[in-house]
Amino acid sequence: MISAIVHKEFVSTLRDGRLLILGCSLLVIFVGFLLSSTLQTQQLRAEKHSVGSTAKQQWDTQSIKSPHAAAHYGIYVFKPDTAVAALDPGLRPFIGQSLWLEPHKRNFERFNPSADETLSHRFGQMTTSFVLYALLPLLIVALTFNTISQERERGTLRMLHSLGLNTQALVFGKLVGLLAAFSLVLSPALLLAFLLLQESFNLSADEGLRLGLLLLSFLLYYAIFAALAIAASAYFKTSRVTLFFLLAFWLGSVFIGPRLGAVLAQAWSPNPSAEVFWAAIKQDIDLGLNGDGNHEQRNKAFEAQLLAQYHVNSKDELPVGFVSLNRQFNDHYSSRVHALHFDRLRDNFLRQQHLTLIGSSLGPSLAMRSLSMTLAGMDLAHQRHFEDAAEDYRHYFINLTEDWDRERSHGTERNAKGESNDWRSVKDFSYSPPDSRFALQQAQLDLVVLTAWLLVALLLLSLSAKRLTP
Amino acid sequence: MMTLIPIEWLRFSRNPLNLWVLALFFVLMTVSATWSGLVAREYRHTEATPVKIHAGVNQAEMHDAPKAHEPAEKSSAYALGSKAQALHMPALGGLALNVSQLDFLSTTINASIRNRHTDGRTSDPLFNPLMHELGFLDFATLLALFTPLLIIALSYGLIQEDRESGVWRLVCTQSTKPWMLVFTALAVRFSLVLMLMFISSGITFALDSGASLAALGQWLVFISCYALLWFAIAGLALLLRISSGAAALVMLGVWLILTFAVPAGLSFAANQHSAMPSRLTAIINIRHFQELSNQQRQSLLSKWYTDHPEITPPSTELAREISSLPAGLELDSQIRPLMVSFDAARKSQFEFMERWSALSPALAMVLMADRLAGLDAPRYADYIEQVNHFEDQWRARFVPSIMANSPWSANESAPLPSFAFNAQQDNAACWRLSGIQALIALAFLGLLFALRRQFAKS
């Protein structure tokens, strides 16, 4: 019996004019966004590569100068985007585009694209992921809101009832049939997306895996909407009320839940202002952490330790450059303080991310968006991974310049010089993004929320079947 | 028509679904209004009583600054000149409408004799990017998003459902002007929707301690036009001879196009009209200037004294930070136009979008809210221009003393430059935005009136 229902639903969904019109419209929008997003990601990759190479060349060809002055010239690094970012750019519009590595202080990435835009994504990002997480569920709502209520209004439900049809088989059969038809319509778009990404970016195995996981997650997400839509259609007496309910749910899930989650997270776990953040770092460096003594005391202690180590009576007698050693000592302390405050801030970002999931109580869209960003490597966790790698590289190249400075000067002299060969000897920043296992670990909570929603949706579908009356 | 209003009200109020929809909208907008108003109030409070924090630079970074053993007067001239002056851009009376946009603008910029463009700490705001990706409950954004949906929910299928049930045929046989019924139904709904929009707007303005009546007045005029326009569109959709479900989907399609697709298209067109320069390319240019100014440090120092014959070059060797000051100023003069070009492009794009705002009511609402909040791109570009002007004045005041290596105390009697940015609301631009919406609404209503006899067809 259930196979007959699945077959009937599958065929009738495919024959439905709404699927043809809406499905084709969405397909066109999806392909349009995908092409534009792929082009944008390609251009951005090329620009980052070109600017990165030029910036490194500028570093390599610096004039003869003090190694520390060269360090102040700094090095720019850029986070590489995965190919999946063409599907979901995630946080890209709200995170800076470049990270400047320089001595003494740690920076955030600067120049987020949203600051240069007039609309700043006020209504959400117009991207392929918007089609996937916002518009396709609307298509499901449009296709299913009257799937059972229409049978009731036409009287066919009474006929089925009189034939002794198992209502569970009816609703679950409709779900399977609808999802099968939906998947069939969606598959050309997905195939096209895969081929386009493969052609444009030469997908790695990990990126392929990420794409596969993303596809599976979206199917799970659509199953939630489809199950809830059929349950609502069975529960409410008229198509009009069902449509109202489902549109309200869609709005709550896609537009209200995420915003509510963000507001609650911001209220319960606020971030410091930039002024307070930087002032706290300055204060900790000046006054010292946990009884380390203030800047002056630390420097005096360091000087005393250095004089004892080299068995000399004054800084001028040191066989190595004191200025550089002292600077390195201070920079080491500064890095420790910066790391403490940066980690605290990013831990709070993570806490806020978890708190936003409260908004998932209004629908699964928030968890899906979060999961999608993570699988695309465009979330907070991947960003942090990159920033930490960049910070390690900053330590490497600053220490290298200090080594030159120290070895090429004595006592309190400041006359060490570096030249082209030195600058060229600095290794390039080579960053390997984490693999999909890292992404899955970060997305555990989102997966739990999505699974919970699927179970709730199936439970409601089952309950609505029990209460189904002609 | 007046006699029909009580009847239509009765019909409307007896449908619990209508009341549920209105209640949901009101709750949502009240939450949004309260959040927006409170955040705006908090911002104004922080702005009015700034914490005396000077993050500045750490001692470890000050290896290029005067040392403690150097003459006190030279130390203080340089130190005072390098002390960052926090320059604020005050928000306007409608800040609560788009308050979260503050995160994207540097409304406090620290200006001094030092280059502010390469140090993110002097102006960059700090926020969790995820929060902005998800979006906040900004009042204007939510009102722009949900008011059309409320109007669709209250008015879709008004005629189509009656046609499907055969009631409309009966109405047409008993009334010579069935369109009057439609217009009355829309008028009742318009009044109710407008009332809720006014109340929630009142809440958000009341909670914002810096709100102004002028901004509220402009806002109420605009949202009236906005609601009227959407009711006109809903009225035109009632003419379609399709099922009520199909009518709902058509209206949703119109909403999606006008709210999402058109602004995205206009954003693209604005970028074509006035392309935003690349920040990444700017980095390369800045580095080029940095290296150049570093190489020309000595020649720029000599040039500075040649250009300022009234200042006698000191006979003693200058501290490094002073001898490199002319190079730093030269570097700044090269970087500044680069940075200004971003604000100029943003301003131009904003004005382009305003010109084309007729194509998207939601876009017009967001632009209007930006104008009333004082966060619009043209005003921000003016602010940056004045910050640059102040920075020039500040440097003109300090640099000669620093370069002359003369005691600072001799100049103390002259007042220091002060900064006050007082650009007010651009009323002409606001009226233009409201006027465009009103004209389109009236045009659509005129079309609906012209086609009114179509309603008589059962």
Image (tube, coloured by chain):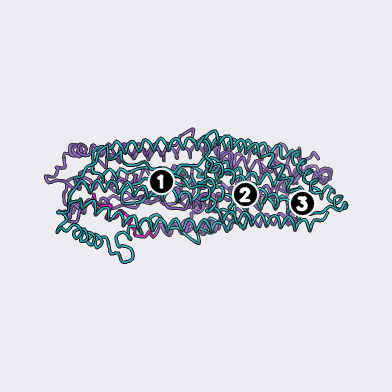
Chain colours: A cyan, B purple
Between marks 1 and 3 in the image, the one whose residue lies nearer the viewer = 3
Assess whether residue B189 is covered by the magenta stretch.
no
- Host chain of mark 2: B
Query: Chief secondary structure of the magenta span?
Result: loop
**In the rendering, at what x and y percent does residue B118 appear?**
34, 45
Give, as a three-letter code, the residue at label 1: Arg
Q: Nearer the viewer, residue B377 or B300?
A: B300
Give, as a three-letter code, the residue at label 2: Thr
Horizontal side of B100 relative to A193 (left or right) equals left
Callout 2 touching callout 1 (CB < 8 Å): no
* Numbered tag placed on residue A93 in the rendering: none
- Host chain of mark 3: A
Callout 3 touching callout 2 (CB < 8 Å): no
| CA–CA distance in space, label 3 to label 2 | 34 Å
* Numbered tag placed on residue B147 in the rendering: 2
Q: Within 10 angstroms of label 2, few (less than 14), some, or many (20 or more) residues?
A: many
Q: Quadrant of residue B250?
A: top right
Q: Are marks 2 and 1 on the same chain?
A: no
**In the rendering, at what x and y percent does residue B255 appear?**
63, 43
Give, as a three-letter code, the residue at label 3: Val
Between marks 2 and 1 in the image, the one whose residue lies nearer the viewer = 1
Q: Within 10 angstroms of label 1, few (less than 14), some, or many (20 or more) residues?
A: some
Residue range (magenta)? B49-64
In the image, is residue B210 above or below residue A146?
below
Q: Secondary structure at mark 1?
A: loop
Q: Are marks 3 and 2 on the same chain?
A: no
Q: Secondary structure at mark 2?
A: helix
Which residue was labeled with disc 3?
A: A171
In this view, the residue farthest toward the bottom is: A291
Horizontal side of B439 relative to B105 (left or right) equals right
